[in-house]
């Protein structure tokens, strides 16, 4: 996903893990721009393999106000853990959004660990193997996490919409549920009165 600005083209794209989180828009983004214009960029933008891993909103704000963004290379061993730790609980997200983000992060981690070198950072995973582990990470109930896991498995795009607050988790599940066949009403047999 590219970060787009009407003012200047940007040279860096968002890392897929960074795109799991919704972008700031409207008044929230304008407030961030105003703060960066008044006080400068306080936190560096973290990049990994040429992509923004954390700080996509700060990067776009810096570019739009004409400040050269300060970048820092990711030096950790687990980008999934870093992104979740840096973003999951500092934002105003519903439990459904948090669960969808964790489920999607787990799917990304599994997809990038396949065939990878066990020592590489892409093979590193969080202990997200059980529903309880994922629920503990997201802060959602196990029931909510199971729902998010199901959506992420069946439709990654729908999971992204849940994570970004575009649709609720229950509505996403409704969209994925097979249509129910109409149930014919039960009709009680008509009894005829006994003949006199």
Image (cartoon, rainbow, N blue to C red):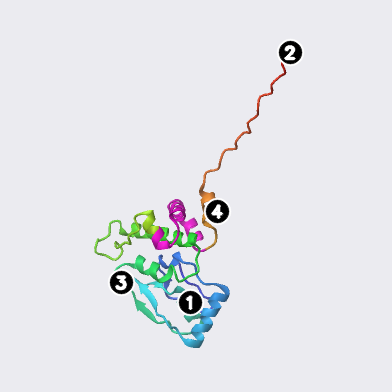
Please give the label number shown on residue 76. 3
What's the distance in space between the residues labelled 4 and 2, CA to CA? 56 Å
In the rendered image, residue 52, in percent from the top left (x then y), is placed at: 40, 72
Is 180 situated above or below 87?
above
Label 1 vs label 3: CA separation? 24 Å
Residue 78 % position (x, y): 32, 67
The image position of residue 62, as x and y in percent, is 47, 81
- Mark 1 — residue? 60
* Highlighted magenta segment, given as a residue range: 135-164
Q: Quadrant of residue 139?
A: bottom left
Indicate whether residue 186 is drawn in magenta: no
Q: Is residue 99 above or below residue 54?
A: above
In the image, 109 versus 4, the foreground residue is 109
The label nearer to you, 2 versus 1, is: 2
Residue 138 drawn in magenta: yes
Find the distance from the CA under tag 4 to the CA under tag 3. Answer: 37 Å
* Residue at left offset 57%, top offset 76%: 27
Q: Quadrant of residue 167?
A: bottom right
Q: Secondary structure at mark 4?
A: helix
Q: Main secondary structure of the magenta part?
A: helix
User: Mark 3: which secondary structure?
Assistant: loop
Of callouts 3 and 2, which one flags the residue occurring earlier in the amino acid sequence?
3
Q: Disc 1 vs disc 3: which is toward the camera?
A: 3
The residue labelled by disc 4 is 171
Q: Kindly identify which residue carries mark 2.
A: 195
Q: Earlier in the sequence, mark 4 or mark 2?
A: 4
Whether label 2 touches label 1, CB < 8 Å: no
Cβ atoms at labels 4 and 1 below 8 Å apart: no
Q: Which mark's residue is nearer the viewer, 3 or 2?
A: 2
Residue placed at 46% from the left, 76% from the top? 10
Residue closest to the far bottom: 38
């Amino acid at each position: 996903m590219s970060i787009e600005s009407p003012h200047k083209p940007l040279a860096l794209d968002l890392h897929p893990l960074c795109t799991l989180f919704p972008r700031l828009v409207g008044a929230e983004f304008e407030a961030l721009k105003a703060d960066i214009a008044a006080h400068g960029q306080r936190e560096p933008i973290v990049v990994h393999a040429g992509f923004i891993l954390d700080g996509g909103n700060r990067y776009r704000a810096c570019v739009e106000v004409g400040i050269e963004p300060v970048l820092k290379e990711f030096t950790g061993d687990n980008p999934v853990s870093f992104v979740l730790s840096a973003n999951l609980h500092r934002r105003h997200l519903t439990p459904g959004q948090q669960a969808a983000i964790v489920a999607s992060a787990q799917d990304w981690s599994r997809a990038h660990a396949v065939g990878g070198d066990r020592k590489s950072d892409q093979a590193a995973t969080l202990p997200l193997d059980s529903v309880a582990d994922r629920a503990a990470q997201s802060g959602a109930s196990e029931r909510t996490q199971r729902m998010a896991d199901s959506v992420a498995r069946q439709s990654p795009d729908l999971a992204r919409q849940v994570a970004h607050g575009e649709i609720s988790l229950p509505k996403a599940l409704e969209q994925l549920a097979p249509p129910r066949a109409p149930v014919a009403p039960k009709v009680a047999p008509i009894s005829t009165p006994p003949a006199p």
